[in-house]
Image: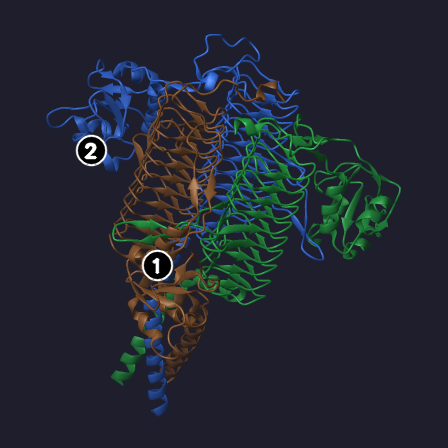
Chain colours: A brown, B blue, C green
Amino acid sequence: MSRNTKPSKKLSPPGRGTLQRAPTTRQDQKSLTLGELARRLGGKVVGNKGISIRGVMTIDEAQAGDITFIANEKYSKKLATTRASAVIVSPALSGQQSGGQGPKPALLVTENPYLAFARAVDLFKPEEVHPKGIHPTATICPTARLGQEVSIYPRVFVGDRTRLGDRAVIMPNVYVGEDCQIGEDTILYPNVVIYPGTVIGKRVRIHSNTVIGSSGFGFAPEEEGYFSIHQVGNTILEDEVEIGANTTIQRGALGATRIGRGTKIGSQVQIAHNVEIGENTLLIGQVGIAGSAKIGSRVILAGGVGVVGHVTVGDDVKVGARSGVTNDLPSGGTYLGYPAEPIKKMRRTQVAMHRLPAMMELLRSLKKKVAELEKRLDLE
Amino acid sequence: MSRNTKPSKKLSPPGRGTLQRAPTTRQDQKSLTLGELARRLGGKVVGNKGISIRGVMTIDEAQAGDITFIANEKYSKKLATTRASAVIVSPALSGQQSGGQGPKPALLVTENPYLAFARAVDLFKPEEVHPKGIHPTATICPTARLGQEVSIYPRVFVGDRTRLGDRAVIMPNVYVGEDCQIGEDTILYPNVVIYPGTVIGKRVRIHSNTVIGSSGFGFAPEEEGYFSIHQVGNTILEDEVEIGANTTIQRGALGATRIGRGTKIGSQVQIAHNVEIGENTLLIGQVGIAGSAKIGSRVILAGGVGVVGHVTVGDDVKVGARSGVTNDLPSGGTYLGYPAEPIKKMRRTQVAMHRLPAMMELLRSLKKKVAELEKRLDLE
Amino acid sequence: MSRNTKPSKKLSPPGRGTLQRAPTTRQDQKSLTLGELARRLGGKVVGNKGISIRGVMTIDEAQAGDITFIANEKYSKKLATTRASAVIVSPALSGQQSGGQGPKPALLVTENPYLAFARAVDLFKPEEVHPKGIHPTATICPTARLGQEVSIYPRVFVGDRTRLGDRAVIMPNVYVGEDCQIGEDTILYPNVVIYPGTVIGKRVRIHSNTVIGSSGFGFAPEEEGYFSIHQVGNTILEDEVEIGANTTIQRGALGATRIGRGTKIGSQVQIAHNVEIGENTLLIGQVGIAGSAKIGSRVILAGGVGVVGHVTVGDDVKVGARSGVTNDLPSGGTYLGYPAEPIKKMRRTQVAMHRLPAMMELLRSLKKKVAELEKRLDLE
C-alpha cells in the first residue's frame, strides 16, 4: 500500500485540541430507592419505598434489584411470577396486589407505564462518553467552522463552509460535504454520509450508513435514453429528528426535502426528493415515500408502507404495515391495504376475500337452481 | 485535513500528483438572456427575448429572474400567478397568453418542456469542482493503474491490478477491490464499496453506501445446514449507468450480473446474482430483483416492485408500484398487482374486491329468494 | 488514538508484523481428473474418469475442460448441447446417455447434484489471501485484545475491551465499537459497522455496509412528541451466520437480538430489536422482521417477506415472496399472501380474485332472473 498511510505528525492547531480517546461507556453501578425513583418518574409506590433498584429489565428476565413494567393488561398475570423487585403499572392494575398473600413485587403506579419505563431505562443507562477534540486523522477543510467541545473521531471529513454546533459528535468515517449545518448536540454514527448543502438541527441522531441528501431519481426522457436532471435542492432535518441505519433521504430537485421537528425514522427507509414530513411523525422500518409526497404531523406509517409521489397524507393518520397509499388521505383516519382504504372497510374486504372460493361454489349452485326454476316455469 | 486541507499551492503533475483540496462548488451567478436560453435548449420565445434569466425554480417558488416550467396542462392556471420571468411550456399552452392583459411571464415554447427544464437546470447548476491528484491518505495498491487527471480523495482504497479511467472521481472512504475496471469520468460518492473483479463503464455515477459485487445468496442444503456456494462471477455496469444510495448489486454466482448502458437505478434497490438488465431501463427506489431474472430495455419498474428469480420481463414493459412479477411478461405491456396482471384487468379486479362485502350480501339474499321460489314451486 | 494507531508492541507478538499488502486472490490454474473430482465430491463417473477438469461453469457457458450441473430434470435436454466435458447429474438422469451415439459429456452421478456443484465451485475457486498483521492506519484502542494471525486492514477502528478471535479478517473502514467479541475466522467486509456490545461467533461473514447493533425504533409517546427509549440490549450472532450487504440488525431494547447458528441473511434486510431467529434459517433479500418476533429453525422467508412484531413463526415454515405474516404460524407449513395463509388456500383465493369481475356479471344476471321468476310467480 502507499507510504502515505502514516498518520500526520502535525497536531491540530491550538484552540481545537486533539481527540485522543475512543468513545466509552461509564458503567458505574447506579442505585436508587423505589421512593426516589417514583419521585423522578412521577408515580405512587404501593409497597416498600425503601427498596433499592439497580436496573431495568423485561418482566421475564428481571431479577431481584430490577424494576420492570406492564404496559398491557393482558400481561397482568406475570405480576405473580416475575422476580423483579418492583413493577411499573397503570392504576387499573394497582389493585391486583391487594388479594392473596400480599404484594410480592412493589408497585410504582403511574398513568403512563410505558413512558415511565422509558425514563427509568434512561436513568440507569450506561453513560456514553465522547472525548472532546479533533482526531489528527480527521480532514477538516479550511473554511469549516466548529463549535465548542465537539468530538471529531478518526477519519471524519468535514467540507468547506460547513458549520458544526457545540458538542456535536461526529463518529469515525463520517463524511459531511461542503456548505452543511449540523446543530448542537447532534450525533452522527460511524459511516454516515451527509451530502453538500444539508441543514441538520439540534439533538438529531443519525445511525450508521444512513445517507442524507443524495441525488433523487430525476431523469427526463430524450430521443435515446434519459437526461439526468441535476438535483440542485437540499435536505433539511429539524431539531430532534432521529434516523435509523441504512436509510436514504434524497435532496430536493429544486427546493428542499424537509423532515419536521421530532419526527423519528426507522432503518432501511427511502425518502425521495422534495418530500415534506411534519412534526412528531413516525416512519417505521422499510417505509418508502416517493417524490413530492406530503406527510402531516403525528402520522404513523408502519413497517414497509409505501406512499406514491405527489399525494398528501393528513395529520394524525395511521397506516398499517405494508400498505400502499395511492391517494390523498384526510387527517385522522386509520388505513390498511393496497390501495390503502379505511381499516374497517379493508378488514371486511379481507374477510370476504378468504370466503371467495366458497362464494364461487354458492354462485354456481344458485345459477344451476335458477336455471332449473326457469325450466320448470317454462314447462308449466 | 490537518495539513492537507490547505489549498494546494503546488499543482498536480500529470499522472499521480497529490490531491490537496476538497471538492467544492463554484457558485458564480450565471445569467443568460431568454433568447440565448431558447437557442441553447431548443424552442421559440413568445414575449421579450432580451430579459435576463438567472436560475430555474418550481412554479410556486420562482421569483423575478427565474425560469420555470409547466409539464402538465392541469397546472396551466399557474401561468397567471407565478412570479417567474419566463415559463417553459408545450405548444398547446402557448396560446394561453394571447387573451387578457397580455403575457406576464414570457414563454419558451418547446415540444418537450420537461427535457428543456432538465437542460436549463444543467445550464444554471453550480459547478462541481474536483481537484486532481491523489490524497496522501489514500491507499493505492502497487499494481493499480490510474488514468490522467483522476481525483482520489482521502482514505480511498484501490486494489491491485485495478484500472481507473481518465478523470475518474473517487470520493472519501470508497473501497475498490482488486481486478476492477472503472471507466472515464465515472464518479463514486463517499463510502461506496466495489468488490473485486467489477467492471464499470464510462460516465457512471454511484451514490453513497451503495455496494456493487457483494456475494449473492447461494446456499446448497446439506445434511445439517447449508454449504455456502462461493460466488465466483462478477458484476458489469455499462456506460452511463446511474445508481442511487444504499443499493446492492450482487456479483454473478458463475458468469456476470449485468446492467445495460444508460440504465438508472434508484436507492435501496436489491439486485441479486446473475440478473441481466437491458439498456435505458428505470428501476425506482426499493425495487428487488431475484437471481437470474432478465429485464429488457426501456423497462420501467416503479417503486418497490419485486421480480422473482429466473423470469424474463420483455422490452418496454411498465410495472406499477409495489407489484410482484411472478411470471414472464411479454414486451410492451403495463402491469400491476401481485401477481402482476395487465393493468386494466387488475384495476377491474381491485374495483370488484372493494365491492366484495356488497356482493356477499347480494349472494345471501339471492340464496334466500331462490330457496323461497323452490319452496313455492314445490308446494304448487 | 493517534498514539494507539501504531501497531501495539504489547499486543502484537513477533511474527505478526504489520499488514502491508492488500488482499489478493491466487489465480493458480487448478486441474483435477474427473475420477479424482468424483472421489472428493462423492459420486460415480459414467464415462472417462481420466479427463481433466479445470473449472465449473453454467451449462450454457461451459467449455471443454469445464464441469457443469443439472439440478432440475427439466433442463435435461441441455445434456445434448452443452460443451462441458462433464456434467453433474442425479441418478434419474444417468441413463440418458446410453442411447444414441453414446455420451458426449461424461457424467458425475450423485444424489445431490446442487451440493456437489457447490463443492466443485469451492475446489476450483481462486483463493482469497489475507495478509496477516495490523495496518498502521488502523485505530486499535488500548484495551482491545487481538488473537493470533488476524488481518486488520487500513483505517479499521476497534474499540476498547473488544476481543478479536484468531485469524479474524477486518477489512478497510470497518468500525467495531467497544465491548464486542468477534470469533475465529470471521470476516467483516469493507465499511461494516458493529455497534458496541455485539457478540459475533466463529466463521461468520458480514458483507459491506451492513450495520449490526444499531438502536431499534423505540419511542414512548409523551405529552408533546416522543421520548426516545435508550436501547441498552445487544446483538448476538452465533457461529456460521452469513449476512449480505446493506442489511440492518438492531440491538435489543433490553436483552438481546439473537441470530442462531448457521442462519443465512440476504441483502437489504431489516431485523428489529429483540427478534430471535433459530438455526439454519434463510432470510432472503429485503425481508423485514418487526420487534420481538420469534422465527424458528430451518425456516425460509423468501424475498421481501414482512413479519409483524411479537408473532412466532414455527420451525421449518416456508413463506412465499412478499408475503406479510401477521399471526403466529405453526411449524412446518408453507404460507403465502398478506395476511399470509396456507399456500393452497391462498392460491385458490388468488384464482377466485381474478374471476371476480366475471362473478359480478353472473351475480347481476342471476339477480335479474330471480326477480323475473318472482314476478312470474306472483302474476300466476
x 29%, y 47%: residue:
A280
In the displayed structure, C39 sits above or below B179; it is below
Mark 1 chain: A
Question: What percent of the width, then of the height, locates residue A326?
Answer: 34, 49
Asked whether the viewer can see residue B356, the reply is no
Q: Nearer the viewer, residue C90 or A140?
A: A140
Q: Are marks 1 and 2 in contact (CB under 8 Å)?
A: no
Residue C125, position as x, y percentages in the image: 73, 38
Q: Is residue C13 left or right of residue A164?
A: right
Q: Tell me if residue A191 can be seen.
A: yes
Judge by depth and name the residue closer to the eye, A368 or C241.
Answer: C241
- Residue lying furthest front: A50
Lateral position of residue B61 relative to residue C32, left or right: left
Marking on residue A114: 1
Residue B57 picture quarter:
top left
Q: Which residue is mark 2?
A: B78
Q: Secondary structure at mark 2?
A: helix
